[in-house]
Image (cartoon, grey):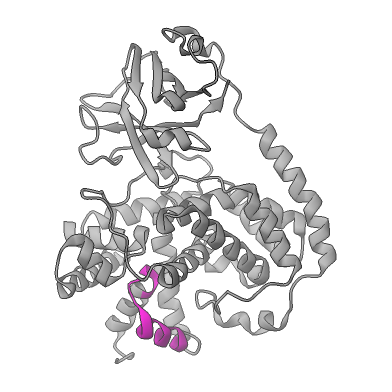
Amino acid sequence: MIPAEQLTTLLAATAAGDQRAFAQLYRGCSSHLFGLLLRILKRRDWAEEALQDCFLRVWQKSDTYEPAKGAPLTWLSTIARYRALDLLRMKRPEVEMPEEGDAPPMTMVDVAEDPSARADERQGVERLEGCMSTLQDEQRQSVLLAYYEGYTHQELAKVLKAPLGTVKSWVRRGLTRLRECLDQ
Amino acid sequence: MKYQNAKLRNLLSAEYVLGTLQGRARRRFERLLRSDAALVGEVRYWEARLASFALKIAPVDPPETVWIGLQRRIEQGNTVPLRKPVAIPPSTAKSTASGGPPVWRILAGLATAAAVVVAVLLNQPKTPEGVPVAVAPAPAVTAPAAASYVALLKMPDADMQWTVSLTPARGHMTVAALGTAPGLGDRSPELWWLSPNGPVAIGVLPTSGNGAMDLPPALANASELKLAVSLEPHGGSPTGQPTGPVVASAIAVHTA
């Protein structure tokens, strides 16, 4: 992962039309965004399509990025994730059920150990994880599955084998609790 | 829907960012975002915080075709399938008018792209030294055609390391453990293949000496072998997915 300061510089140069900076930005972030897209979309071809869409948007919209809007990687991964969600809704009208016993998302990268992660990124991850741990199990699981799998309420209900209304309230209460904790 | 209620506004923003706000409600929310700066602020709040989830996912290198196709689309001024970004604040007024980038910029970029490819290739990890030493009966003797890979998985801040040699076509791997792993306690180091669809368990690694393990069949078709070691409860992850911290990771290098 390239340090956030460098990404900000590259984004600014991309906005100014610097192709070389754009190529470097792609090189520095594409594997990170591709990992996220693969996680959500599952299919390689869809993830490749979404990655391309995402960087096309970055090329077109890099002039709208301001550091005040958060870390560049936050901005980029948000663009990527929205694109993935759109693609999912278009292409996955019916949820493909995971195998029995599939666990919710894993933790594969220890951001705390990554020296290139910016201090505030590390703190952000730690804070979010700390607050997630204050949620009830069902609430936490619902939020994680929605984030990492892109599940809708209906899909969550199917996967978690619970009534739709129950699942909706898990998500709602989970997010409300999360907000309370994050605001502290 | 009463958009004036602060709690509700926050909750809708959270569900919008999470993605569970769906269909017509989502579209309605997006329309509202265009004229409601305070609501954009709420969305921004959640985007910034939930993005931390994304930082936890291990990167996966996309194929080079994505970059090449991207260049082509930029060149053709392809803007068709993208929806108007609501995630991006209302300062879009200035940017919507600006068309695609001039072609000369793209042409200049193609050369850079090629340079990037070369640089990436040059940066491939080197084969670790003395790799096949500890590995038991050399499988290459019987069928030299099967591709084999090696990876060195090293724990940071410890001298514990594993050298793994994989022959995916035969579904077989060997491992040599070297050094000592302090503070493992009752936990077992488990080896994972980071497949495009998520981690697949290979097995618990020995902490000393040599060992052999079977590989998951799907691994035979992998184009890239990314491996990771996580610390799991004694005997390995109870869920079939990594539950503990990742202590080492590497991309296996093709050796034969």
Q: Quadrant of residue B53?
A: bottom left
Residue at point 64% right, 48% down? B64
| Residue B137 seen in the current view | yes
In the image, taking residue B4 as reference, residue B125 lies left or right, namely right
Q: Name the chief secondary structure element in magenta.
A: helix
| Residue A177 seen in the current view | no
The correct choice, above or below, for A59 with respect to A34 in the image is: below
Q: Quadrant of residue B207?
A: top left
Q: Is residue B28 magenta?
A: yes
Where's residue B252, x and y in %?
Answer: 51, 28
Q: Is residue A132 magenta?
A: no
The correct choice, above or below, for B80 with respect to B53 in the image is: below
Which residue ends up furthest to the right in the rendered image? Answer: B104
The quarter of the picture where the C terminus of chain B appears is top right
The quarter of the picture where the N terminus of chain B appears is bottom left
Residue at point 22% right, 41% down? B239
Depth check: give the residue in front, A176 or B132: B132
The correct choice, above or below, for A10 with respect to A89 in the image is: above
Depth check: give the residue in front, A58 or B45: A58
The correct choice, above or below, for A56 with respect to B195 in the image is: below
Residue at point 53% right, 24% down? B147
The magenta stretch spans which residues? B16-32
Where's residue B228, x and y in %?
Answer: 41, 33
Residue at point 14% right, 71% down? A163
Depth check: give the residue in front, B249 or A51: A51
- Label count reads 0
Where's residue A179, x and y in %?
Answer: 29, 68
In the image, taking residue A165 as reference, residue A23 lies left or right, namely right
Where's residue A54, x and y in %?
Answer: 57, 64
